[in-house]
Image: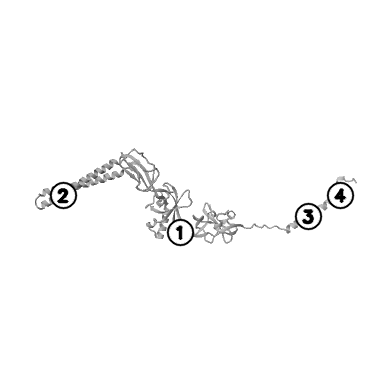
Amino acid sequence: MKPAHPAVETRLSNAPRIRFAFSRVCIAIVGFVVLSGCEQNSFVPPPPSKVDVSPPVQRAVTRYLLATGNTTPFNTVDLVARVQGVLEAISYVDGAFVKKGTSLFTIEPDPYKLKLEQAQAAEAGAQATLKQAEADYNRQVTLVGKQFASQATLDQSTSARDNAQANLQQAQVNTKIAAVNYGYTNVAAPFDGVVSVHLVSVGELVGAASPTQLATIVQLDPIYVNFTVNEQDVLRIRAEAARRGLTSKDLKEIPIEIGLQTETGYPHKGKLDYAAPTVNQSTGTLAVRGVLQNADRILLPGYYVRVRVPLDRQQDALLVPDIALGSDQAGRYVLVVNKDDVVEQRKVRTGPLDGGLRVIEDGLTADDRVVIGGLLRAIPGQKVDPQLKKIEQSAASAN
């Protein structure tokens, strides 16, 4: 018999050791499977996220009508030359504040003074003529009564007396006209105000063909503010006035507050002064005016101002931090935590800001827990770990 190949003999001699090693691997695999079946892993969910919650703040708030307006002068007058003459003097400094009656311009007074004196002299002559005519009339009445004079003579005397009386009246009118024209030579301030730059110079002829404008005077204290109110607000104001039993006279006692663009809040106080009797059909607005004291003349005509008018005062209004509000295509909303500690998205109707908090007109109750902190961790439909906080302390710390 032919002997086996050396390689074949080697494999045959190692066969028992290979079978032994394979058996050990199989045993190890089986043991691992058995152990794996005994130690099963289970998923443990993370704890709910912590968020800060608080019920809405409940307090009385004043509701305001907000508008924008412009300041206008209480009075403004163009100072003009009402008589012809040479401008002799300018008695103020451009832009100065003057009191009522202060002389500002002098227009060649001498010719008008002479005319006044001439008219006064004519009036004195007419008075003397009337005195003589009345004496003659009385004498003729006596003579006619004694039948020493004819009735025709009395009629002539009566006519002379009446004519003298008419001449005196004409002379008195001429004197008043001359006095008025003489007064026009002195252009004085009609009220307390600030006078603009003069528009003519000393020595210039004024009032020759038509009244010549000399300057403008503006009264700044008090000062008006004009603004408009839309039709919906007009209806709301009238309904509130009817509910409170207010009359048109009472409406003029309603306070008004304004603030400049560089000011915080509404530091300037006044009262409503006028409301137009009709609504403008083209704009759907009502013209309204307020009046404010302006002794320090901080407000100037033409300023663009913010206007606030208190309408009513609501007791137990609900307020939340403005930062707790979100918005989407459907409007404004807040996140609230229900009784099961699950976050809900609640649609709300918002009102004005009051003391840094936003008034909630509709959509919340006093018992709702509003998310005011940890907003990014509050996902609608998920459970959270609510932490009760105070709104005043957490309003600025929401994240």
Q: CA distance from mark 1 to mark 3?
A: 84 Å
> What percent of the width, then of the height, locates residue 55?
54, 60
Eye-nearest disc, 3 or 2: 2
Eye-nearest disc, 1 or 3: 1
Q: CA distance from mark 1 to mark 2?
A: 81 Å
Chain-order first, disc 3 or disc 2:
3
* Residue depicted at x 75% and y 56%: 33
* Residue depicted at x 19% and y 47%: 128
Q: CA distance from mark 3 to mark 2?
A: 161 Å
Residue 363 shown left or right of residue 237 in the figure: right
Q: Amino acid at mark 3?
A: Ala
> What percent of the width, then of the height, locates residue 24?
80, 54
User: Which residue is labeled 3 in the image?
Assistant: 28
Give the residue furthest to the left. Answer: 147
Q: Alpha-carbon neighbours of circle 1 within 10 Å: few (<14), some, or many (≥20)? A: few
User: Which residue is labeled 4 in the image?
Assistant: 13
Q: CA distance from mark 3 to mark 4?
A: 25 Å
Tell me the element at label 4: helix
Q: Amino acid at mark 1?
A: Arg
Chain-order first, disc 4 or disc 2:
4
